[in-house]
Amino acid sequence: MTLPRVSIQTQDFDVSTELHALRHGDRGVGAVCSFVGTVRDRNEGDAVASMELEHYPGMTEKSIEAMVDEAFARFDILGARVIHRVGLLQPLDQIVLVAVTSAHRGQSFQACEFLMDYLKTQAPFWKKEQTAQGARWVDARVTDDAALARWGITARNA
């Protein structure tokens, strides 16, 4: 069974299962780098009760697939897997997994960071936090845009 490179889903994911599937049967893999993002209980000094993520089905996957293609073009990697959850999430819930395999660690680290920088600023997701002050939409931070810029990519909302 071929694992999809990109999944947008409401259900949680098991990191161990995903990493095993990504590297399964590839004897050239010498490095696996992964990043798991979770929902924080605070943002901008306020308590966060929950976060809701929305996306455009089809468009979001296509956009992330294009960035995975770009990661393969830029780095000497063997595999990549991106899972991003949507829907209503609570603090401590896993929200995103980015995993990359390569022969050597440097390429995996770089590709993983590249993909995460893209996801934080360019992937078409809309995040709404529930706080004691009410609901608010969350935008990318200036530091996220700067992280993306080091890859030679200008944030589309800049």
Image (cartoon, helix red, strand yellow):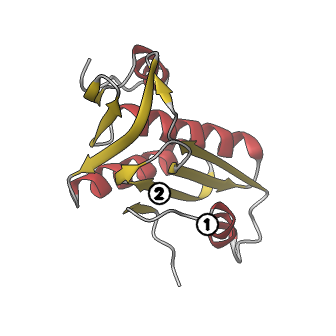
Q: What is the x, y in percent for residue 145?
A: 40, 20
65 left or right, relative to 34? left
- What residue is shown at x 43% (from left), y 17% (from top)? 44
The circle on residue 83 is 2
Q: What is the x, y in percent for residue 66?
A: 35, 51
Looking at this view, name the residue that lies furthest to the front.
132
Q: Does 105 appear above or below 44?
A: below
Q: Are marks 1 and 2 in contact (CB under 8 Å)?
A: yes
Q: Name the one closer to the observer, 116 or 79.
A: 116
Q: CA distance from mark 1 to mark 2?
A: 9 Å
Residue under numbered circle 1: 18
Q: What residue type is disc 2 on?
A: Ile
Q: Residues within 10 Å of mark 2 (few under 14, many from 20)?
A: many
Q: Name the one closer to the observer, 127 or 50.
A: 50
Q: Does 154 appear above or below 20?
A: above
Helix, strand or loop status at disc 1: helix
